[in-house]
Image: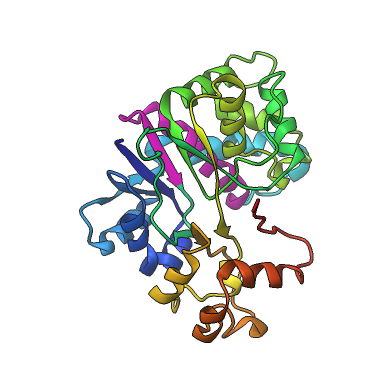
Amino acid sequence: MNYDVLIVVAEKDFLRLKNLYHRAWEHLKCNKLIFVGNRAVGEMTKELDNSNVGWLDEDSILPFNEVHSVMKKCLAPVLQGQELPRGITGWYYQQFLKMQYATICEDDYYMTWDGDTVPCRTVNMFKEGTGEPFLDLKTELKKEYFDTMGRLIPGMHKAIEKSFISEHMLFRKDIMKSLINRIESNEDVEGNTFWDKILYSIPANLIQEGVFSEFETYGTYVALTNPMAYRLREWHSFRLGAEFFDPNTISDRDFEWLGRNFDAISFEKNQSVREDHKNLFDNPKYQQKLSAKQMLQAIQSEFNGGYVEVWDT
């Protein structure tokens, strides 16, 4: 199946993982790997020296300043004259870019992949033999995402036990365009476009808490309106990768070991290897005796809150 992979990424995140992005091209089975960002990101992609890797100006999909302007109006009661940080808008903006791309996509499908995430093994998004596309599932749950959905599309509700939020998603263009149309047709919500309606639908005091998810919304819409369009699959990623591995020193041996249990590893910003985590997961002696799954399950018992990886079996 023909499809491109979009990586929406900021400059700092690109620089952090630049030396690992070759794994994205090698392990994500796609036509082309397209980085979506500002012009500085565009210049950086040239350093990857790969004809199958490209760049798309984020403003050509959806101008940031238009979203930022609406965000200022939505947060006016909270800001009370203060300047709005670009980062608050950016968190929603990167989601809107992934949705808006459906309006210019030339293929039936396109996939988005988080810029802070690296595949540990080959990722096939269509089932071998049948060609059925996959929607991958994890265990994250945030009630507010569904509250926002219900305001955008009355009657929309959580449809399955698990969550559609992972570090990637394979979108079917026509379904995404249908979702966008459904949101834009809701005359009870202020705004004209899907993205400004999303912002206007969220109470001002909740916007900064990040109460909209493009992945959860799309997956739920599929489950409720076109449940046979995808095959559901369990997905496992090493979410707190940056607490145990340095992206500058993680090795092929580490990826091979991780890939036996994990599909991907994420290096979230503002995280680094703690002193008591050094020489732990990347220790070849430990890797010979224990699997990555066993080690993470053991150490997760010490986590105080935050995301915990769960296996069905």
User: Picture coordinates of residue 32 (x, y %)?
Assistant: 28, 46
Q: Is residue 250 above or below residue 187?
A: below
Q: Is residue 298 above or below residue 163?
A: below
Q: Nearer the viewer, residue 99 or 117?
A: 117
Q: How many marks?
A: 0
Vertical placement of residue 87 versus 101, above or below: below
In the rendered image, residue 47 lying in the magenta stretch gets the answer no
**Residue name at image x 53 percent, y 23 percent:** 180
In this rendering, position of residue 106 left or right of residue 308: left
Residue pushed farthest left?
51
Percent across and percent down for residue 19 are 36, 69
Q: Is residue 107 magenta?
A: yes
Q: Decide if residue 90 is in sight here.
A: yes
Q: What residue is rendered at 45% in x and 76% in y? A: 250
Q: How is the image coloured?
A: rainbow
Q: Nearer the viewer, residue 5 or 189?
A: 5
* Left or right: 134 as drawn, with respect to 240: left
Displayed quadrant of residue 212: top right
Q: Which residues are magenta?
A: 86-112
Residue 285 image position (x, y, % from top left): 52, 86
Classified by dominant secondary structure, the portion drawn in magenta counts as helix
Q: Residue 138, relative to residue 10: is it above or below?
A: above
Q: Quadrant of residue 242?
A: bottom right
Residue that appears at 41% across and 42% down: 125
Q: Quadrant of residue 202?
A: top right
Q: Quadrant of the N terminus?
A: top left
